[in-house]
Image (tube, rainbow, N blue to C red):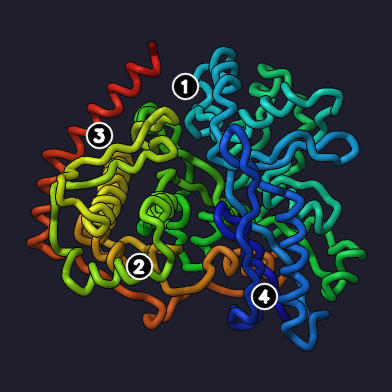
């Protein structure tokens, strides 16, 4: 028997076929997430994306002789982004990327009607223009004659196109700014205050719970049996955590990609004043009766992409550069230069869409190699600040951090993480963790018992901090980075108020 996991990501989309018995990856189909360049930045090209998913399903099904044994298709995706549909299921307006900022005026409207502290008390997440509610209001303001009838997050929309059934999933609902985290349902208070019909939001289902079967025309087109069950597996970072067995508060996950975040699985959410002031997010996990503490830094892999564009580097050239840095011991060589990587705004604990990147330590001899080190140093300092915020809030201390995603392909970055954070870094070489987690949740949803996830040591690479160079990095972090960070945020806040 087989299960398919779909990962709709910011940069790439993947459709992966797994054998359920051992969760072996049989076939992967990937494509660049299609976007349209607009005056605001970029939107997802949802029609082209949908065609890529359908093509991918056909490709992976064709890799096995018995595609009728594909029993489930489950979809994970980025959070916040989604699609507004009218009464005839036509798409209203553009499909904004999660990091789009055009809905800032709508956020101002929201907080004028419900205070930021009350929003956090209800939803467990800080008011920010990225969240779905702002996008919904923007689209409603620009809907023209179309009558808004339904909002679906990205994974929910793909599942709807596969099955014809509209449903919402809890971990994605937690990223909308319209979900009541204490009542465990859509917030009547928020919808009423903003004149949004509660019916705009679909009934909620658990991650992996079947919402329907594959539509007949898609079965014929892809070769997958009509009886294959469709489900929503949820928010990609949470789905990836399932694939590597993160399930308790004694564990912490660093999920990396276009962004990177820190994820802790918890027994209950916390929307106290200290959590609110730190701008960290609570939410539903994709596991039953589990919650998350999660915060994302907007520029991780994106900062690296920006660097390669800046110096016109091909992927092979970039890989050679980082491999050379690692081989010459650059991960053990502190410098006074770094990038504060606020290329798409800042993450917690001082979250702002108005934050800008800042490079410190550039000299007349600075070349592309030195600049790349500054980028990586800054990414690690930013992650350290977030980790320290977590530990202050929770009273926990994590000696080891599991890493999944793009960073696991970069030993230089991983060693820097270990030394600058002063923690063991455990890099998981498991390919396509999000798609695997989606397939696992979908298989469980149709009754297959997959058991607990235990990763063999050959899938893990462990990095230990370098004590001597760690002291040098700590000096830069404490004496320079933190002071410049605080001053920069203060200046940006003042400019934003004028």
Looking at the image, do the residues carrying marks 2 and 3 touch, with CB atoms under 8 Å apart?
Answer: no
Give the residue number, with chain letter if any, for mark 4: 17
Q: Position of residue 269 (x, y in %)?
A: 48, 40
In front: label 1 or label 4: 4
In the image, residue 278 lies at what x, y percent?
Answer: 36, 33
Disc 1 from disc 4: Cα separation: 44 Å
Read off the residue under disc 3. Answer: 485
Mark 4 or 2, nearer chain start = 4
Q: Residues within 10 Å of mark 2 (few under 14, many from 20)?
A: some
- What residue is at 74 percent from the left and 85 percent from the top? 64
Residue under numbered circle 2: 410
Mark 2 / mark 1, whichever is N-terminal = 1
- Please report contact status of discs 1 and 4: CB closer than 8 Å, yes or no: no
Within 10 Å of disc 3 (Cα), the crowding (few <14, some 14-19, many 20+) is some
- Residue 11 visible in this rendered orientation of the protein: yes
Residue 259 rendering spot, x and y as whole percentages: 45, 50
Q: Residue at x 65, y 53 (%)?
A: 34
> In the image, 43: left or right of 221?
left
Q: Which mark is residue 489?
A: none
* Precedes in sequence: disc 1 or disc 3: 1
**Quadrant of residue 153 within the rendered picture:** top right
Residues at marks 2 and 3, CA–CA distance in whole angstroms: 26 Å
| Image position of 17 with respect to 391: above or below | below
Q: Which mark is residue 117?
A: 1
Q: Residue at 20%, 33% (x, y): give it.
A: 484
Could you give the CA–CA distance between mark 3 and mark 4, rounded to whole angstroms?
Answer: 44 Å
Q: Earlier in the sequence, mark 2 or mark 3?
A: 2
How far separated are the C-alphas under marks 2 and 1? Answer: 40 Å
Please tell me which residue lies in front, 138 or 226: 138
Mark 1: which secondary structure? Answer: helix
**Mark-to-mark CA distance, 1 and 3:** 25 Å
Q: Secondary structure at mark 2?
A: loop
């Amino acid at each position: 028997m087989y299960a398919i996991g779909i990962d709709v990501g910011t940069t790439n989309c993947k459709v992966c076929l797994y054998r359920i018995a051992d969760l072996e990856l049989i076939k992967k189909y990937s494509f660049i997430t299609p976007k349209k360049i607009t005056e605001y930045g970029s939107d997802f090209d949802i029609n082209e994306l949908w065609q890529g998913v359908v093509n991918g399903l056909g490709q992976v099904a064709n890799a096995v002789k018995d595609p009728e044994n594909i029993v489930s298709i489950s979809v994970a995706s980025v959070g916040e982004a989604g699609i507004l549909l009218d009464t005839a299921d036509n798409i209203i307006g553009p499909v904004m990327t999660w990091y789009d900022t055009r809905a800032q005026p709508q956020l101002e409207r929201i907080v004028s009607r419900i205070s930021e502290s009350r929003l956090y008390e209800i939803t467990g997440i800080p008011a920010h223009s990225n969240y779905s509610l702002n996008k919904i209001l923007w689209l409603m303001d620009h809907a023209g004659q179309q009558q808004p009838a339904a909002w679906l997050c990205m994974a929910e929309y793909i599942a709807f196109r596969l099955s014809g059934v509209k449903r919402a999933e809890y971990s994605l609902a937690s990223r909308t700014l319209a979900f009541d985290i204490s009542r465990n349902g859509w917030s009547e208070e928020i919808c009423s205050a903003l004149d949004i019909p509660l019916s705009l939001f679909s009934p909620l289902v658990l991650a992996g719970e079947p919402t329907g079967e594959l539509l007949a025309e898609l079965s014929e087109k892809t070769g997958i049996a009509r009886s294959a069950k469709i489900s929503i597996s949820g928010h990609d970072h949470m789905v990836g955590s399932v694939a590597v067995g993160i399930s308790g508060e004694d564990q912490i996950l660093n999920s990396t990609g276009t962004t990177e975040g820190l994820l802790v699985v918890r027994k209950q959410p916390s929307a106290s004043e200290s959590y609110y002031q730190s701008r960290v997010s609570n939410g539903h996990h994709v596991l039953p009766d589990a919650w998350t503490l999660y915060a994302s830094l907007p520029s991780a892999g994106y900062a690296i992409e920006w660097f390669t564009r800046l110096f016109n580097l091909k992927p092979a050239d970039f890989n050679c550069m980082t491999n050379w840095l690692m081989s010459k011991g650059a991960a053990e060589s502190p410098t006074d230069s770094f990038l504060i990587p606020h290329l798409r705004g800042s993450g917690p604990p001082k979250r702002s869409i108005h934050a800008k990147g800042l490079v410190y330590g550039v000299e007349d001899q600075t070349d592309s190699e030195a600049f790349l080190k500054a980028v990586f140093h800054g990414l690690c300092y930013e992650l350290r600040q977030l980790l320290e915020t977590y530990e202050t809030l929770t009273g926990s201390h994590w000696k080891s951090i599991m890493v999944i995603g793009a960073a696991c392909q970069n030993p230089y970055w991983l060693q820097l993480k270990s030394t600058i954070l002063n923690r063991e870094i455990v890099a998981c070489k498991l390919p396509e963790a999000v798609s695997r987690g989606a397939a696992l949740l979908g298989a469980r949803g149709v009754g297959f018992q997959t058991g607990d996830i235990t990763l063999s040591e050959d899938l893990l690479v462990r990095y230990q901090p370098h004590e001597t160079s760690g002291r040098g990095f700590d000096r830069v972090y404490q004496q320079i980075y933190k002071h410049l960070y605080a001053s920069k945020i203060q200046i940006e806040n003042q400019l934003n108020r004028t």
